[in-house]
Amino acid sequence: MKRILIIGAGTAGTMMAVHLSRKLSRKEWVITILDKDENHYYQPGYLFIPFGIYTKKDVIRKGAKYIPSGIEYLLTEAEQIVADQNRVKLKDGHEISYDVLIIATGTNIHPEETQGMMENGWRENIFDFYTADGAEALGKKLADFKGGKVAIHVAEMPIKCPVAPLEIAFLSDWYFAKKGIRKDVAIDFVTPLAGAFSKPATAKVMGHLLKERGINMIADFGTERVDYGKLIGYDSRAVGYDLLITTPTNMGDALMARSGLGDDLNYVPANKNTLQAKAKDNIFALGDATNLPSSKAGSVVHFQSEILTENILSYIKGKELSASFDGHSNCFIESGYGKAFLLDFNYEIDPVEGTYPLPFFGPFSLLRETRLNHIGKLAMKFVYWNILLRGIPVPGISSKMGTAGKKISQA
């Protein structure tokens, strides 16, 4: 029997297990998936926890529930990938050999990478929202917050879900207004980017909304260190705060460093179209674990998993890897007050106005703030748990970005 080994049972790993279990002969192939955490997390839901819209119970379920029957599911941690020998050493001393390896280890926050962040107020007046615990702790802090200076901060790029810091800024504005203390709160949006977002048209729209909401954008801010109550930039600029809501440095799994398969941030270098790792032809990577220039977002994983399934089947048959990922990504941007935006873009085409997923009919509007987009954002929790993770096709949603119904000339 031959083995496909998947490291990581989050969104990417689970989707690959589901797709491959339907395509491969069980008489010829064993599919093994391993993860060190028994829980599965709906990470886009973290955004809503600080504001009391969701709780941790909404975003955490047992991972085994979503692994198809017949797949070997191991709760263990990989110590090292020995790529030249096609085997993985586990921390418990055992080893697993493989014929094809899929790396789906994701990305995690590393506040210790910024000088002073852990030492000068972590979980006291410095909070993340990229973990369930961090989002819950931030919620408790916000509930007691009476006013002062709030800094929404991004340490450096790339980060998981690049729009999330903007969403936190907009929702904070809404939340403080709802509490009746918005006039007592000054909000700074501190980013290493030149604008509100990496894509020019979107940056213009988001920058305008930040200004409209009375949120001060501090751009091109390279964070050197965190003093108590103050961000210090490499250019000596200082941003004071009473509450810091930060997106710390994001890095791939340390397993990649131990295995010699990662870049400086522990992301796996891979072909941006085929998703084949550059280190060895029987290793593939997808999702947040890669160094690809696509967004680190759940929709990307959804689209990549379809492409990668085709390419792995081609690899097994000794055929050319013909399926090509175009960088397709779409994401809702929650803007507060019951509204949201929706972006749809790929490697070549930036977000533009239009409709999604059906050309001209929508029902969602692209790069426009609407009530229906907000409803779509909230509906994604049900769609995630009950459709996407189970590999059920969504009508009208393609892994390739379509151009019909979009004002491409804007890009």
Image (tube, rainbow, N blue to C red):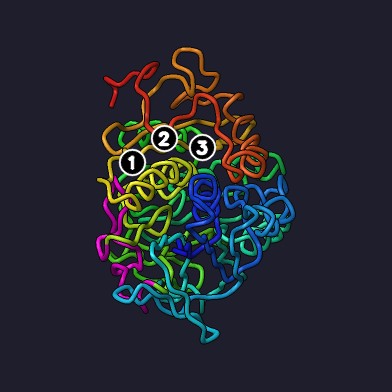
Q: Nearer the viewer, residue 365 or 286?
A: 286
Residue 67 visible in rendering: yes
Q: Residues within 10 Å of mark 3 (few under 14, many from 20)?
A: many
Q: How many marks?
A: 3
Vertical arrangement, residue 402 with respect to residue 296, above or below = above
The image shows residue 225 at horizontal and vertical percentages of 39, 71
Give the amino acid type for the residue marked by disc 2 in the picture.
Ser
Tell me which segment is drawn in magenta: 256-280
**Identity of the residue drawn at 63% across and 32% down:** 337
Residue named by callout 2 = 399
Q: What residue is disc 3 on?
A: 333
Determine whether label 3 and label 1 are within 8 Å by CB: no
Q: Which mark is residue 325?
A: 1
Q: Residues within 10 Å of mark 2 (few under 14, many from 20)?
A: many
Report the disc number at residue 192: none
Position above or below: 62 against 389: below
Q: Earlier in the sequence, mark 1 or mark 2?
A: 1
First of labels 3, 2 by sequence position: 3
Measured in 3D between alpha carbons, the distance from the residue under mark 1 to the one under mark 2, in whole angstroms, is 8 Å
Q: Amino acid at mark 3?
A: Ile
Front residue of 116/74: it is 74
**Residue 386 counted in the magenta span:** no
Three-letter amino acid code of the residue under disc 1: Phe
